[in-house]
Image (cartoon, grey):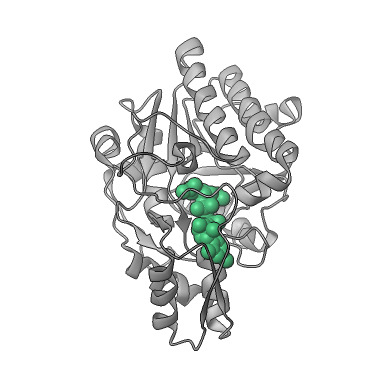
Amino acid sequence: MIYQEKMTTNSYELKFTDKSCIVTGGAGFIGSNLAIYLAKLGAYVTVLDNFSTGRKENTMDFNSLGIRIIDVDISEKEKVSEYFSGVDFVFHQAAVPSVPRSIAQPLLTNNSNIMGTLSVLENSRQSGVKKVVYAASSSAYGNTKTLPKKVSMQPSPLSPYAVQKLAGEMYCKTYFDNFQLRTTSLRYFNVYGPHQDPNSEYSAVIPIFIKKALSNETLTIFGDGNTSRDFTYIEDVIQANLRAAISHHSDGHVLNVAYGNRFTLTNLAKKIIKKIGSKSEIKYDSFRKGDVLHSLADLTLTKELIDYEPHFNLSTGLSKTIDFYR
Ligand code: UD1
């Protein structure tokens, strides 16, 4: 568990005491961290997850924290509708992530990522949920002509995953415009931290590199190593979710959630090897299909609308994450 040492009393966090919250995908990496954080703030938390990519081990503390977990597929609208009644906030984190998986299985990921989102929005609307915060993705931008990436830029998705996540945020916007369901889409930029699965062929780069470096295995970089990402620590993502949930200014908006700095893959690999004191070597392989080349967020609007301030630079976030995997 990552929050034992720090239960803050920021004023925005006090607004979740006794509130009823749903976290979809709450057995996944981001969802489980968020569900635990909310429960510790005194919220009543229900997790909806079908364990397709979510993991039982992420839910081990749920019972003791009073988090209710329902094993259900959120895309089955009628089956999940009963759980939305009386709910204040919905944090919609459920998705089948990974750019390469969406290229391998576009139909399967489409169902979870688009039908799942539509079902959550429709249930939220029918039950009078106060606010839906949606986990959107920086992949929606594709390769922009300039950096940093701003939400005013034309989206240019390069993979089915990016298309699906973009469709979800467009649905959020239309639900706000047509039905006054309050929604905010948070475009996450490469989130990492404790509880991220390092063992799947579709795992993200940071848990893969940490796991390999801990056992002195070779780290494989896809491409020439100059691909860059704005890596974002989980606690900053939680902060953005909480702030978006209680904010009215952000209704109907799409916001970037990131740290606001970028590192190349070679730089990342070297940092991890050094921090661990590993004997791992680095090898280079061909570029991965559907990959964006460079990613860096402009956070101006996020700061303006929800007062978001990232606290964890890559070095601090990596140290905390490595401690967890050790
Ligand atoms: C993308 C999104 C991210 C989203 C995620 C969900 C962008 C810029 N980011 O992440 O916001 O949360 O999808 O799945 O679109 N790599 C290696 N070696 C490995 C594994 C990966 O070099 O062993 C490389 C990849 O080719 C890629 C980079 O590392 O260039 C990051 O990959 P990954 O962690 O899978 O995330 P993105 O696809 O960038």
Could you say which is closer to the camera, residue 269 or residue 275? 269
In the image, is 69 to the left or to the right of 39? right
Q: How far across and how far down the image is residue 300, in percent?
A: 24, 38
Give the residue furthest to the top.
178
Q: Nearer the viewer, residue 283 or 53?
A: 283
User: Residue at point 32% right, 61% down?
Assistant: 312
List x then y, in percent, for residue 68: 64, 47
Residue 38 seen:
no
Quadrant in the rendering for residue 118: top right
**Total number of numbered discs in the rendering:** 0
Using residue 317 as the reference point, say whether residue 64 is left or right of it: right
x, y (%) of residue 11?
A: 27, 44
73 sits to left or right of 239: right
Q: Quadrant of residue 243?
A: top left
Instruction: Name the residue at 58% across, 84% down.
Output: 215
Depth check, front residue: 244 or 1: 244
Q: Is residue 185 visible?
A: yes
Identify which residue is drawn at 57% across, 77% down: 212
Residue 174 against residue 199 in the figure, above or below: above
How far from the left and from the top, in percent, is residue 70?
A: 70, 44
Q: Is residue 54 above or below residue 188?
A: below
Task: Please name whichever residue, 70 or 208, is drawn nearer the observer in this view of the structure.
Answer: 208
